């Protein structure tokens, strides 16, 4: 048992301990005798992976709640851990009884008659699994409804039919990703799950409307100790988007009003680290970089060097995006079937000069399919491997410039600096890099391309 002093109060945490030879805290307790056959060992021991006492205390409370919930479920005859309900599977179950989603949710005269076949199927399940005595007690309303005798899909379908369906926070990412068509995008999946898992571990797993402002403030206080404030803000915005979208799409009225808005994160952005530009000497070294066996990495580095393009934008380029025969050779950047763009302002026409022009010429000559960077296009052809490309580019530059080399994303910031140094107007700088908020009438015309190419050439 450990004790924590908070002002004039002392809080005891019975199952929190720290080994003499370890720096991290653990949650450890003996399994109750009546549940011993449900666990492989007589003790439950969970590493909190924290050596900060206050953070460990917050994590301890959540682990304790989850373990107590496990015990409660097991004593009710349910599985140890709640199986996340698949909303679509519940709808399929209702459809098997000729009920549409609208009919299942309907209220008023005659609505219960339409659902009768479904209710009778649940009664058949209960009759099969319960003893005669238990079934009689349930039918005479002498005992609570035996939810534990139904499987997860049956319980979810019943909740939909009764207008009581709600999702816990941990169930939102899967449904959100599926409805947004992003369930196969590894980056989107990881971001959504990481954000929600972090919040659930800290504040518990409940429906959105059951969280309070103090829960959000607790998450912020705990998270900023190990994460950048911008990361915490981004995770809260992601959680809010999931809650808003799914509660509206599934018409979960109780959870359409919640407290996830206008977050107050002290010092937001103050801990951000400014990206370091490539120095003049480093740029010269990159231009003289000896070729390697991986043409795509060499060309991607040179392309980013003299365009300021993002790694993901490079990965999704098609051979047809390059116009090398125009008076001003250029690339046309747009959202395509293998990669999106960061925002609508990222759609642009980029002049090719210097290293970027040579790189594209080499890639076009070497192309064996529609892609300029086929190594970094998924086999399914519906996404790009920009994380792998970024890692490979960074590794190559560290080998060339040393361990303190800026990252590939610094090419964008360096390009802005180079353009400012040649007195390129801000609107043109933003158009070249894809930061423009308003696109000029001449955007992408031969005269506009020629002007942008003039400023880019001056940076050489």
Image (cartoon, rainbow, N blue to C red):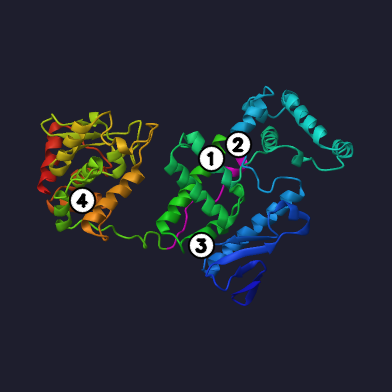
CA gap, disc 4 to disc 3? 36 Å
Q: Is residue 78 inside the magenta stretch?
A: no
The answer to whether any part of residue 408 appears in the image is: no
Q: According to the image, label 4 marks what residue? A: 416
Q: Secondary structure at mark 4?
A: helix
Residue at image mark 1: 174
Q: Are marks 2 and 1 in contact (CB under 8 Å)?
A: yes
Tell me which numbered mark, 4 or 2, is placed earlier along the sequence.
2
Residue range in magenta is: 252-266
Q: Within 10 Å of the Cα at label 2, are there few (<14), some (14-19), or many (20+) other Cα atoms? A: some
Q: Is residue 52 above or below residue 236?
A: below
How far apart in space, not on screen, are marks 2 and 1 (Cα)? 9 Å
* The quarter of the displayed image where residue 292 is located: top left
Report the mark closest to the observer, 4 or 2: 2
| Marks 2, 3: nearer the viewer | 2
- Residue 327 image offset from top left, x and y in percent: 10, 31
Q: Earlier in the sequence, mark 2 or mark 3?
A: 2
Q: CA distance from mark 1 to mark 3?
A: 25 Å
């Amino acid at each position: 048992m450990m004790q924590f002093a908070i002002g004039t109060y002392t809080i005891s945490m019975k199952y929190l301990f720290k080994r003499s030879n370890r720096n991290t805290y653990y949650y450890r307790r003996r399994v109750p005798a009546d549940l011993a056959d449900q666990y492989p060992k007589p003790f439950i021991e969970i590493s909190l992976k924290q050596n900060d006492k206050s953070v460990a205390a917050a994590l301890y409370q959540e682990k304790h709640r989850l373990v107590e919930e496990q015990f409660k479920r097991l004593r009710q005859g349910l599985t140890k851990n709640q199986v996340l309900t698949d909303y679509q599977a519940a709808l399929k179950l209702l459809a098997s009884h000729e009920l549409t989603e609208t009919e299942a949710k309907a209220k008023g005269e005659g609505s219960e008659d339409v659902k009768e076949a479904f209710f009778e199927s649940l009664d058949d399940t209960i009759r099969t699994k319960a003893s005669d005595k238990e079934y009689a007690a349930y039918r005479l309303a002498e005992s609570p409804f035996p939810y534990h005798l139904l499987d997860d899909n049956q319980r979810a379908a019943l909740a939909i039919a009764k207008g009581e369906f709600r999702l816990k926070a941990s169930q939102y990412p899967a449904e959100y990703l599926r409805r947004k068509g992003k369930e196969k995008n590894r980056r989107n999946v990881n971001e959504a799950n990481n954000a929600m898992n972090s919040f659930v571990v800290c504040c518990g797993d409940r429906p959105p409307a059951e969280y309070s402002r103090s829960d959000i403030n607790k998450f912020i206080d705990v998270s900023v100790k190990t994460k950048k404030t911008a990361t915490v803000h981004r995770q809260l915005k992601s959680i809010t988007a999931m809650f808003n979208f799914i509660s509206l799409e599934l018409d979960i009225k109780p959870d359409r009003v919640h407290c996830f808005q206008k977050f107050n994160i002290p010092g937001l952005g103050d801990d951000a680290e400014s990206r370091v530009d490539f120095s003049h000497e480093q740029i010269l070294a990159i231009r003289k970089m000896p070729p390697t066996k991986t043409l795509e990495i060499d060309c991607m580095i040179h392309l980013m060097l003299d365009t300021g393009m993002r790694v993901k934008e490079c990965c999704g380029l098609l051979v047809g995006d390059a116009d090398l025969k125009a008076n001003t050779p250029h690339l046309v950047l747009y959202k395509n079937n293998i990669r999106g763009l960061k925002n609508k302002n990222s759609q642009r026409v980029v002049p090719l000069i210097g290293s970027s022009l040579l790189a594209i010429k080499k890639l076009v000559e070497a192309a064996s399919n529609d892609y300029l960077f086929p190594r970094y296009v998924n086999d399914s052809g519906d996404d790009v491997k920009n994380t792998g490309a970024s890692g490979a580019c960074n590794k190559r530059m560290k080998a060339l410039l040393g361990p303190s080399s800026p990252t590939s994303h610094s090419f964008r910031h360096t390009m802005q600096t180079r353009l400012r140094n040649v007195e390129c107007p801000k609107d043109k700088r933003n158009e070249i890099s894809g930061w423009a908020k308003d696109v000029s009438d001449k955007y992408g015309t031969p005269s506009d391309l020629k002007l942008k190419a003039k400023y880019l050439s001056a940076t050489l």
